[in-house]
Image (cartoon, rainbow, N blue to C red):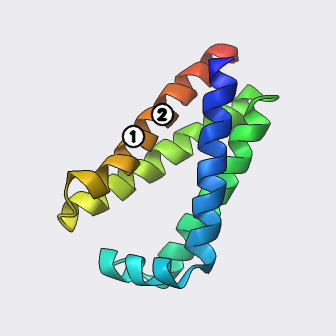
Amino acid sequence: MIIKVLAVFSSLSFLYYGIVCLFSKEMVLEFKRFGVSSWQRVLTGILQVLGGIGLIFGLMLPLIGLMASIGLSALMLMGFLVRLKIKDGLIKSLPSFLYMILNIWLSMAFFQLL
């Protein structure tokens, strides 16, 4: 039951932020502040949306959930490192770190379902 709740929570979060990443003018400015190119912003948004979809499908097909959660963990690790690189501080860096931990846990849970 907990895996379903956490997978849906993570999925909805990544679907939302992936869409925002793709279409929000504020995110265009934020990615410029990160020192990241426009195509990397688009790629990040697409990967977030695909990862969010993958987590939902993972509830039926654990291998897909495993791949999605590993990919999202890696994406959040990179996001966390970018935040550290630009010296954003703990408050702004913490969400990416926590989502990384959440998706690492989900990857272990999906692995056990295989």
Residue occupied by mark 2: 102
Q: Residues within 10 Å of mark 1 (few under 14, many from 20)?
A: some
Residue 96 percent location from the top left of the image: 39, 50
In this rendering, does residue 70 appear at all?
yes
Secondary structure of the residue carrying numbered label 1: helix
Residue at the outermost right position: 60
Compared with 57, 93 (above or below) is below
Work out how far the residue at label 1 is from the one at label 2, CA to CA, in angstroms: 6 Å
**CB of mark 1 within 8 Å of CB of mark 2?**
yes
Residue 92 percent location from the top left of the image: 30, 58
Tell how many labels.
2
Q: Residues within 10 Å of mark 2 (few under 14, many from 20)?
A: some
- Amino acid carrying mark 2 in the image: Leu
Residue 40 percent location from the top left of the image: 49, 74
- Amino acid carrying mark 1 in the image: Leu
Relative to 70, is 33 on the left or the right? Answer: left
